[in-house]
Structures are given as C-alpha cells and as structure tokens.
Image (cartoon, rainbow, N blue to C red):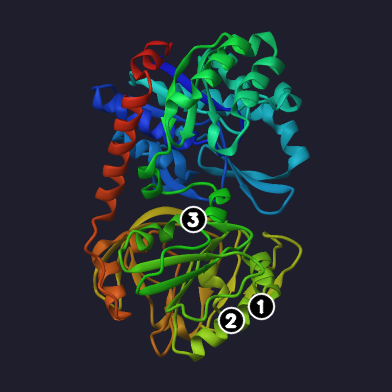
Amino acid sequence: MAKAIMLQGTGSDVGKTVLVAGLCRAARNRGLKVRPFKPQNMSNNAAVADIPGDNNHGGEIGRAQWLQAIACGVAPSVHMNPVLLKPQTDVGAQIIVQGKVFGEARARDYQALKGRLMDAVLDSWGEVGEGADLVIVEGAGSPAEINLRSRDIANMGFATRADVPVVLVGDIDRGGVIASVAGTHLILPEEDRCMIVGYLINKFRGDVSLFDDGLKAIEKFTGWRCFGVVPWLKAAARLPSEDSVVLERLASGEARALKVAVPMLGRIANFDDLDPLKAEPQVEVVFVPPGKKLPADAGLVVIPGSKSTIGDLLKFRENGWDRDLAAHRKRGGHVVGICGGFQMLGRMVRDPNGIEGSVTDAEGLGLLDTETVMEPEKMVRNVSARSVPFDLPLEGYEIHLGRTTGPDTMRPSAIINGIEDGAISADGKVIGTYMHGLFGADGFRGKFLESLGIKGGGIDYRAEVERALDEVAAELENHLDCDAIFALAR
C-alpha cells in the first residue's frame, strides 16, 4: 500500500482542496507517483471520471479531485472520491458511490447509511493506492464534529481505519484560528488526537512574524508541531472552484468591456463553466445573488447548471429574474443556458416520475421553443464535440437527466459523438446545450466573444490552470516544511 498523509480542517472552506492540489503537484515535481483521495465530498460541482472496466460510461466525482488528479498528472478515477453527496434540497441529497447513483437520502437517514458506505470507501482506498508512492487525502468539514464521530467516514473515522496520519489546517482569514486549533485538540478523543502529527495555518495576509506569539500559544495548548504558515495564495483564484460557498465572494468583478451576468441558483451546479470567461481580460463575470436584479448593462446572461431544475426555475421567477431576462432579450442581449439552464430556457419542464421532487410540471422561460422531460437514466460521460455555429472543436462532459425536444433543436448548438445537441433560437442570440466545459475550448471561446463584439480567446485556459498549480506548489515549498510532511506519511 502507498504511503499516505491526510489534511483535515478546523472547519469547512479552510482551503484544504487547494493545499492538497499544491502538495500533489509538489510531490509530482519530486518524481513521486502521487494520487489524491477524498473519502466523502459534498458538492454539486461534479466532474466525469473513468470507471475501470466500463469504456462506455463515466462516473461522477467532485471537481476538487478532478483538479487534484491534474496536479498529479494522472487521469481522474471514480475511486479518488468514492462517496459524493449532491444536495437537492436543504435536507436531502443524491448519493453517488464509486461514480454511480446509489440513491437519495435525507440528512438524518444518510447518517445511518454511512456504515455501509465505509466498505466502498476502503475498497476505493485500496484501488487508489495501487502502484502509487504517495496518496494525499483530503478530509471534509471538521474532525471536531464529535456528534457525528460514531459513523464518520470523511475524517477521523477514515484516518483511524486506514491508519493515515493527519495534518490539521487552520484558516486565519476567518479569525479565531488559535481557538479553532486548540479547541480541536481539546475536544477530540485520545484515539483521534493521536492521529494528528501537526498543523499548518492557511490564508495569512501580511507580516507572518506578527503571528509568532500565536504559534507559541498553539504549541502550548496542543504540543503539536507547526509545519508552516501559508500566505494568501493569489494563484488559487485561477483554479476551478468546487464549493458554492465561494460564490458570495464572486458576486461582482472588475468592470470590463463585456459584462456576463450569472444568476446564483439555489442548487447551482458546475459553475466553474464560467472560469474560462472570467480569465478573459475584457470579460467581467458577475454572479447575481437572490434578491438582486440581473444587471441591465449585461451583454450576456448565462444560466448555469442546476441539481434541481424545476425547483430553481420556480425560484428564478420568485426573484423576478424572468422579467429581467425578458427585458435583456428585448434590448438584444444574448443568453446561454447550460444543462439545467438549457432546460429552463424552454417552454416547459416535466418530471412525470417525480425524480427531482413533488412538483412535476413547470412553465419554462420560453426563450427557446423546446420542452424537457426528466427521465430516470442519467447521462454521465466525457465528450469531444463540434460547435455548429462556429464549426470549431469543443471538449467537455455531460452530467444530466432529461431529454429535450422541440422545433429549436433543429438548430443544434453542437454535434456530440455524431448526435445533435442543444438548441438555438431563430435569431441566434439564445443558445442552449447539455455540454459542460464549452467555454474551456479556446478557439470556440474566442469566436463566440468575437460574435459579441469582444476580442478574446488569446488565453490557453488549460495551460493557465497548470501554471496556477505550479505557482501554488512553489508557494507551499517556500512556506511549508514539505519534506517533513511527506516524511511523516505512512
């Protein structure tokens, strides 16, 4: 079995995903065969990964493990994230196990399922470690949630079963980092506390020497060694974001030639589709929170994916975004709908089997002459395609339920594996597609922006992600004792 080390946080959103990605790249740069692993993830930002032995279908994992696989220089596998929870309501989620839909459960019911899921986690753990020198594991939430400890599969429940040493991550940017690290030490049971080999501080701004007394205080309370203090990593902003919690920090951008408005749907999914547009020098991407109007000066509105199309469509109307969108179209504005956003743009969305919930019919936004019917079988696959209007190659993935038909599908937006996909309005200004990742195609993105009167496409987006990973790894090498962290792996 490969050696392993695990990063757990004092809370959610402390930066574990980027730190693991950076450490994976640092280990790869040292010539190690390194792999990422996250026992359990909760996110509607999913990626498509290979299912060993199944050449026809892909499986779902969190975008974080997809990014970390890139950092390792390997193809993503469903075993890198064996349990993925995709929230559909405030109290329930779809459960993905080793890439495939396992079922749905309310939060309370899910706790009872965890014992059965640990077997899948440990099975995938063995698969990921096969042939690797090092596995870097990412926890979820915090090990200090001791009320959930008895059935935990994401943090200490996994670490103790797999005998993986833990580095604790504290986030100084949110405040209270001394208390969060010391408090974690205080309330962990002895068996779990012994798994922690040290800690690091993340997201520091300013003169790190000002925190010397803070480090002494943490050492006094815990006895743990400090592996370093990581500054605010500017390069992390150029990496795909996984969790919707970051959206509140993306609500507005710097004013540029083209404003792209993106409504923040309640169950927004795969919003990193917008990252390549954000990277364009002349494009301002504005994520619009509920209660705010879609900006009247936007040249393009993108309706992103959704884990609950009908639910988000109803909320879309409650927010008055349907009226804003109609006004946008009247002004000659352009609209792109991706996956669930594409479904919303039609005349009607039907869910006769109640797959998404109790509401089985909803009137669409009516910007495309199409209708969508939800069907039980989920399409999950990586695809190579071609843009119909621009006759340029595309590359991305599909994760969706439902089949969309209607007159506007006779004007497809893409050809995927020889089959027409999506729809375009008669005037060409409303485009719908089931394909995620289309803006990542540099040539297509450039021509699309050119059609909106903007110069773009000069950026190699994938190369930018690689450079950002290299920069994060370099910063970690400068500010962490990476040698000591890797040496403690077992």
- Report the residue marked by disc 3: 270
At horizontal 28% and vertical 43% (from top left) the residue drawn is 466
Placement of the C terminus among the 4 image quadrants: top left
Q: CA distance from mark 3 to mark 1?
A: 23 Å
Q: Secondary structure at mark 2?
A: helix
The amino acid type found where label 2 is placed reads Asp
Query: Of discs 3 and 1, which sits in the foreground?
Result: 1
Mark 3 vs 1: CB contact within 8 A: no
Residues packed near mark 3 inside 10 Å, few (<14), some (14 to 19) or many (20 plus)? many
Q: Earlier in the sequence, mark 3 or mark 1?
A: 3
Q: Is residue 223 left or right of residue 445?
A: right
**Label 2 with label 1: CB-CB less than 8 Å:** yes
Q: Which residue is mark 2?
A: 324
Q: CA distance from mark 2 to mark 3?
A: 23 Å
Foreground residue among 201 and 216: 216
Residue at point 61% right, 80% down?
322
| Residue 40 in which image quadrant | top right
Amino acid type, label 3: Asn
Across and down, in percent, residue 328 comes to 51, 84
**Secondary element at tag 1:** loop
Decide which of 333, 204 is in the foreground and name it. 204
